[in-house]
Amino acid sequence: MKSKLLSHLPHNDAPFFRGLHIAIALLILSQIINSNLTEREAMGENNIEAFITWFHIISGFTLIFLGIVLLCWMLTQRGVRWYFAWLTIDFKGIKQGLLLLKKRRLPEATQGGIAATIQGLGVVSLLLVAFSGGLWFLTQRMTGVTAEMARIFMHWHKFLTTFVELYFYSHGAMGILHIYLARNK
């Protein structure tokens, strides 16, 4: 069953990337699920809210580490221009991808293309959310840091989470669509 399920997932040629991708996806899903059950005041208590809050914090720091590993792996495998060609005002890959989508065909992953650009932006979004949450936690625990500073980091953490959730759901839907279309060629 496991091998049959894995055979339908992409990245057969890169098991490290596949495993890292799945681990990050599961951690993000758990963060989305448990985020509404976290309580700042519960951190010093011994109850279910404290457990969920500490799980959220620990898995958030784990996502910082895994997100950095993922970004470094991506950049060493394909380079900055593969994922961030738009930073050099190079939109050829995105334009070609949009033309293929207009013809109702999914574009392949190419340098500066839609898939690569979305993946790059998704990893950057993940890191921004995780770092802002980590900074909130650290400012909460530090003495001499104003409560206003902690509130600013929490505001950014919650605001940026919107983009990661949007990315998570749309990336998952596109992945499922891509697997379905690849199986039914």
Image (cartoon, helix red, strand yellow):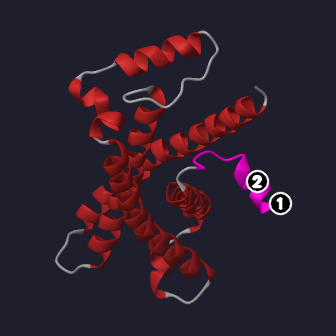
Neighbour tally class for label 1: few under 14, some 14-19, many 20 plus, Cα within 10 Å: few
Q: Which mark is residue 1?
A: 1
Q: Name the mark on residue 5.
A: 2
Q: Is residue 31 left or right of residue 136?
A: right
Q: Nearer the viewer, residue 68 or 45?
A: 68
In front of the other: 14 or 171:
14
The residue lying at 63 percent from left, 39 percent from top is 175
Q: Quadrant of the N terminus?
A: bottom right
Please say if 81 is above or below 33. Answer: above
> What residue span does the magenta drawing correspond to?
1-12
Can you say whether 5 is above or below 110 in the image? below
Which of 130/93 is in front? 93
* Residue 81: % across, % down: 29, 34
Please identify the residue farthest to the bottom as the structure is shown. Answer: 46
Answer with left or right where residue 147 lies relative to residue 127: left
Q: Nearer the viewer, residue 7 or 127?
A: 7
